[in-house]
Image (cartoon, rainbow, N blue to C red):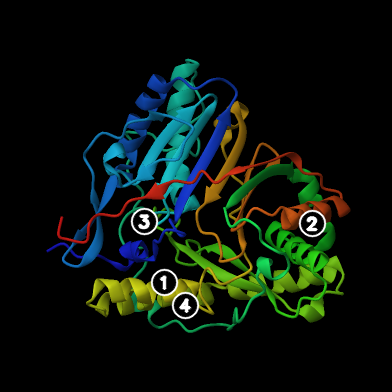
Amino acid sequence: MIRSSWTDSNFYHISERFQYTIRGEICLKEKIDREILQDAVNLAFRRFPYFCARVLFHSDEFIVVPNLLPNTVISTDKPVVLGSEEVNYHLVVITCFEDQIVFHVSHCITDGAGRSPFTKTVLYYYLAKKYALKLDTEGICLAGDAMFPDECGEPISIRKLMKETPVCQYSIGEAYKLTDGCRVWNRERREYRFHIDEQKCMKICRELNATPSALLSVLLARACWKQNPHIHKNIVHNLCLDMRKSLHNEHSHLLLLASIPLIFSPSMQHFSIKELCNEAKRLINEQKQEQHVRYLCKKNILEYDKIRRIKDLKMRESVVQAHIHGREGFLSSTFILSYMGRNHMGSLAPYIKSMYTAVDAVPDDGAIIEVTSVNGRFFFTWTQDFTEECFVSFFLEELKLIGLSADEFCDRPVLTAKIKLPDTIDS
């Protein structure tokens, strides 16, 4: 009998304004050859067969099953619809245009750390064939390689997790919303992109005894206070945290993200940058302790069990929507901030011009900031719930005040993929 597991549960989160998809956009130095890219994609899927998948609705549950239909590379600069007939119902689709390769991925089945090895393998096979190169394969999984023992299956014994207790408890509460501080004329979502020098940023982090995540969270808070100095609510960032290290599972391809709140109260507005960084770093260190991260994973499983016990699908979806949009929900913070550390692209790096990641997971009346690193630069994608540019402008000012200039700033429509879920009848 086919049954879902807690790793399949996120499909109940999807709504018109929360598609939960990833767009990984890599710009190379020459125009993309679609036929060579198709060959590279075919080889890569031989190593990562679990990404050839589709979602079905079976026995009143969404389940992920193998998809044996071709995964065709599409030449387009437009978003795709994952799970649709046009992409053979796949949840991972690759497109290309000009000098760009774009990876469209359902965040319900993986995360940045989970999809990164697949991305590297596609790039390796593409570059090796296009330029007839013998590239160094260190850190790259090849089509004939065996999977790691911890790559598939549930990442940790649930029995072990059920014993965990929290190290600390922080409440999002009624977080400040960006639209509290400005009049919104247009609710169309907008994306802003730019990059900064990684070495300069890391030098400043060392001077402030900060991490990139701590520093960026502080600058986001200061941008809010600059835009609206009379804020009386907490500014709250949901910081994305990879749980793999704490679960002792390095290679799992599943979605293993937790979010930890970084809280900046109105009383902190007059703190120095260093004092703010110290507080942000304290909050991060406290909440990323192994015991606490395992407790967060336990919470995810218990929430899934609660969802699964609800028999009526509409009620199940309603409960999940209330959970993620409610007072303590994932989308109730001011910002979501995601920086997973340096990308080690190895022999592929010289051929990459830029690497931007966007995620359709925008907080209500807020913004999500995805930061990707490659070739000595931090690439920012700022996606927000409205078109006004004031907050991103204040953030760029804060960067400038500490000696970091934003290069190649641009704005554009949001291009993350949509997703089509199956009809809610047995498929």
Q: Alpha carbon of mark 1 to alpha carbon of mark 3: how far?
A: 32 Å
Quarter residue 323 falls in: bottom left
Label 3: which secondary element: loop
The spot of residue 402 in percent (x, y) is 86, 54
Q: Which mark is residue 321?
A: 1
Q: Is residue 100 above or below residue 411?
A: above
First-in-chain label (2 vs 4): 4
CA neighbours of label 1 inside 10 A, class few (<14), some (14 to 19), many (20+):
some
**Horizontal relation, residue 264 to residue 50: left or right:** right
Residue type at numbered disc 2: Phe
Task: Please tell me how crowded label 3 is: few (under 14), some (14-19), or many (20+) other residues with Cα within 10 Å.
Answer: some
Taking the image as shown, residue 385 lies to the left or right of residue 269, namely left
| Inter-mark Cα distance, 1 to 2 | 32 Å
Question: How far separated are the C-alphas under marks 1 and 4?
Answer: 22 Å
State the SS at label 4.
Answer: helix
Q: Earlier in the sequence, mark 1 or mark 2?
A: 1
Q: Pick whichever of labels 2 and 3 is earlier in the sequence.
A: 3
**Residue contact at pointers 2 and 3, CB within 8 angstroms:** no
> Crowding at label 4, few (<14), some or many (≥20) Cα neighbours within 10 Å?
some
